[in-house]
Structures are given as structure tokens and as C-alpha cells.
Amino acid sequence: QVQVVESGGGLVQPGGSLRLSCAASGFTFSRYAMSWYRHASGKERELVARISTGGGIRNYADAVKGRFTISRDNAKNTVYLQMNTLKPEDTAVYYCNAEYTANRSLNYWGQGTQVTVSS
């Protein structure tokens, strides 16, 4: 049974930090590129960051470059998103996505974790 479970969201003040985790099971994690997306109220879902299967290639949305860092631990089947210098506009539900590199139509989503940046 495939499971993708995010955790680590919460309420944080502007300028603060959070670390999101995404634990995966039920598939060969090391063969999947992993991404974080976010969906803010009234906006379209957007790609935040993506990491290749081995972790050597990382891509970020312009809005988070220099503030967010994506990483993965294939031994633990987990991907992380370290978020620093958070802004109110980072408020959204953050979703983890697993994409099979040999067949990009095969992908899995988590249920999402809420991140709220507010004073």
C-alpha cells in the first residue's frame, strides 16, 4: 500500500523557520523524483521545489530561492523541506509528490500539511 505522509506544518511568525518532512512507503523511493508543491487560498497550486532521485539536482521556484532547501534521505524514504525566513505569502497547504522517473504519469500525493505565517 502506497503512503505519502507530510508532517511539520504549523503556525510561525514572519522571519521564522519550519522543517517539513514527507515519509513514503509502498514504492521504491529511490526511483522517484520528489517535489514539494503548495496551494494557497485563491491561488493555483505551484511547484515549490524538486529533487532528483539521487539528490544531485534541485530546482526551486523563484519565490523561495535562497530561503528554502529541499533534501532527501533514501535510506529513510523521506524528503524534507527546510523553510527559513518565512513570509506571510508562504502561507499555504504544502503537498509532497513522488514522480516515477521512468514514467512520469505515475505519481503519488500526500494529504498536505498547513503552513501559516502570521504575527
Image: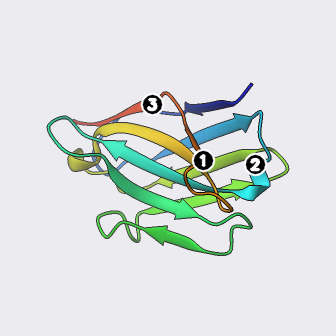
Q: Disc 1 marks which residue?
A: 106
Residue at 18% in and 43% down: 43
Could you tell me the amino acid type at mark 1? Leu
Instruction: From this view, report whether residue 20 is shown above or below residue 36.
Output: above
- Local packing at callout 1 (Cα closer than 10 Å; few below 14, some 14-19, many 20+) is few
Q: How many marks?
A: 3
Is residue 10 among what the camera can see? no
Q: x and y percent of residue 99 in the render?
A: 60, 52
Label 3: state its secondary structure.
strand
For this orientation, the residue located farthest to the right is: 75
Marks 1 and 2, how far apart at CA: 13 Å
* Comes first in the chain, label 3 or label 2: 2
Q: In this rendered view, identify the residue nearer to me: 3 or 89.
A: 3
Which amino acid is tagged 3?
Thr
CA neighbours of label 3 inside 10 A, class few (<14), some (14 to 19), many (20+): many
Q: Residue at x 56, y 59 (%)?
A: 70
Dot 2, crowdedness within 10 Å: few (<14), some or many (≥20)?
many
Q: Earlier in the sequence, mark 3 or mark 1?
A: 1
Write the residue at 85% across / 50% down: 75
Q: Position of residue 74 (x, y in %)?
A: 79, 53
Callout in the foreground (3, 2) = 2
Q: Is residue 111 left or right of residue 24?
A: left
Q: Nearer the viewer, residue 98 or 74?
A: 98
Q: Which mark is residue 29?
A: 2
Residue under pointer 3? 113
Mark 1 or 2 closer to N-term?
2
> Can you tell which of label 1 and label 2 is closer to the viewer?
1
